[in-house]
Image (cartoon, coloured by chain):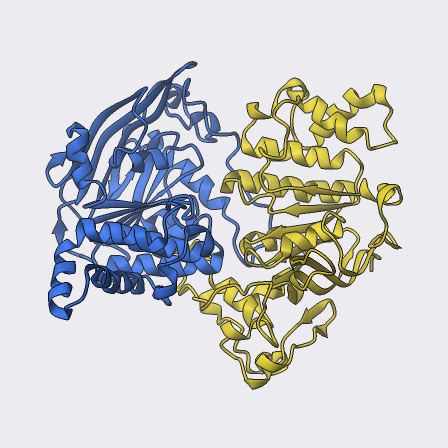
Amino acid sequence: MNTRIENTGQNPDSLAGLTVEPILQVQDLNVAFNIPRGKAKILEGVNFDLYPKEILALVGETGSGKSVTAKSVLDLMPGNNRETQGQVLFANKDWLTLSNKEFQSIRGDKISMVFQNPKSSINPIFTLGEQIFRLIRLYLSDQVEDIKQKKQCSQKQAMKIIAREKLNEVGLTDIKRMLKLYASEVSGGMAQRYRIALALISSPEILIADEATSALDVTVQAHILKLMKDLCKNKQTAILFITHDLGIAARICDRIAVMYAGRIVEIAETKKIFSNPLHPYTKGLLKAVPKFGKNEPLSFVPGIIPDLVNPPRGCRFHPRCDQAMEICREQKPESQNIEDNHTVSCFLYLN
Amino acid sequence: MNEPLVTLEQINTWFPNHKPILGKPTSWIKAVSDVSLNITEGECLGLVGESGCGKSTLGRAILRLAPLYSGEIGFMGEDIGRLTGRRLNPYRDKMQMVFQDPKASLNPKMTIFKILSEALYLNSRVAKKNYLEQSVKLLDLVDLRPEHIYRYPHEFSGGQQQRICIARALATDPKFIVFDEATSALDVSVQAQVINLMKDLQGKLNLTYLFISHDLSIMEHICSRVAVMYAGQIVEVQDAGSLFNAPRHPYTKALKNAVPIADPESRQELGILKGEVPKLSDPPSGCHFHPRCDYKEDICSKKSPEICKTEKNSWVRCHFHEKLWEQGVLIDSKELL
């Protein structure tokens, strides 16, 4: 695998020109579920690297395996009838081989996650204060002791001071009142900010945002996106941003990985994906995005995403592809590097 | 110029917020206040706004699915705002609705034939023996195949389910269809298919649409005019093309700037609108938008602006719309587009 490649992100003060080690490597990840109908091959050979300080977007249609990829990284998928193969390398360790207990000690600590619906990922029967205090006790007990000594205050007051600081960072105000509220009493935007603040308490190196703004209004979404971008810049957190909205990917992400039916079909820098898309699916997806100032019929990718119990042979996209060739029906395309940092899995670009 | 099919005069839809055991409610949630709109026959009017601004309630109020506190709803030249029960029925089948989540709006225990027959039952022009033939015709209209007719909703993808919902809406030969966030739950490529289908059907069957959405970027593709709603009031109505290039209300501009443009080359900075959507039970005094507005002055917090006509087919509710228009502060420079 290409462990050392140049990262020339969209972000001007990112690590342009330097060679950096990826912070997270997902190698040949396969996830399948045994269901009564057979074996659903949800992910098939997913490969990607996440570099420090970058925002990587994972885009694709519903059912393309974006969330499964993210959840597999944190081992959050239900395990009863699941088969997982491959490697998730973080800090020179293969996460998938860790025991549940070992995993528990790093999950949430080094990598944390923000989910789509903020209200359902906050416990409704505890106040927002109780939940943030619990995390502060878990991860920031040193700071709490420090403040207790310095200010000669109680543990609770020390925790409140930290909570205020952490919630201010994500742009929340009126914290005193907020800590007494329940999840149902705050708006969606506030709940999502609070959720992000919780995810950041452990100062994670990687933040996984699974459709973190899809349930929010555009105006609130703009706030959250700005927050994410600042976070990446100031705290040097790498973000894996899962979204189906190419507009968001274009605005905040440095690189984009396009997923289709459990495979990553193309990875490149954001600008390259938009200016020079190679895979026919990426092209189709880009054309389907509604744009301002254009009043013409929208084009679309014909057909629907395949059944993953009996996926098409060869390239999984060939039944919907208008450039499908004989070889596409027979063989699975390997991912190949077209130019630096632009990888595509398609036979059209076979040299 | 076509005749207006739907005319709304000073519509108010209020829900009681606090009601004592005896007597009238003491406070109200003003979901829709003082909305006046015309929807011309054959046009597609878009309705945008943040969640909680009352856009769905307005759509439901027009169809008489939400209570009407005061105002007049003219439909096909008749005031249907006060009609109830049997007297409303002749108008009911002329107006239909398509909802956001297609899966939730189709009965999982019914086959597609049964779902469509239920709607056809309301259409007195179709005899019972012709239901099957008519159902197949309806499926053909929405590009589904006849063999789909004995399947159940779960056997279809999200886009196909939404097509079935559209077919069901068409079963009663409606003139007017309200699409309440009908494409929001769909993927982009599926959304494009459904939008193209909606446009085709509009031309073929001479339908009038009210398209409710929070997504501004699809508005231009489907709507001829767009109304922007904020905190229960219409703040701007304009042609879809000029609304986003040259908005007259500060809220329209803020809304547009918050939509991420799918082009990394554009130098768009995501516009951040400060504050939260006001509570409809206790909206701000004066202009509802003033706490979040960049151009506010003293009068904005004291006096509620009237909605006034700027050009043909274009209205705006702002004290300073003429000044802002002359200064051109709301118009984006070409670079940003």
Frontmost residue, B167 versus A83: A83
**Among the chains, which one is blue?**
A
Residue A21 appears in the rendering: yes
The percent coordinates of residue A81 (x first, y second) are 32, 19
Figure quadrant of residue B175: top right
Figure quadrant of residue A323: top left
Q: Residue at x 54, y 84 (%)?
A: B297
Q: Residue at x 76, y 28 (%)?
A: B118
Q: Is residue B92 shown left or right of residue A128?
A: right
The percent coordinates of residue B155 (x first, y second) are 56, 23
The percent coordinates of residue B319 (x first, y second) are 63, 80
Q: Is residue A55 shown left or right of residue B8?
A: left
Q: Which color is chain B depicted in?
A: yellow
For the image, the number of numbered tags is 0
Q: Is residue B312 above or below residue B62?
A: below
Q: Is residue A299 above or below residue B39?
A: above
Frontmost residue, A115 versus A153: A153
Q: Is residue B137 shown left or right of residue B230?
A: right
The percent coordinates of residue A60 (x first, y second) are 41, 39
Q: Quadrant of the N terminus of chain B?
A: bottom right
Frontmost residue, A180 versus B258: A180
Report the residue that reaches farthest toward the bottom.
B298
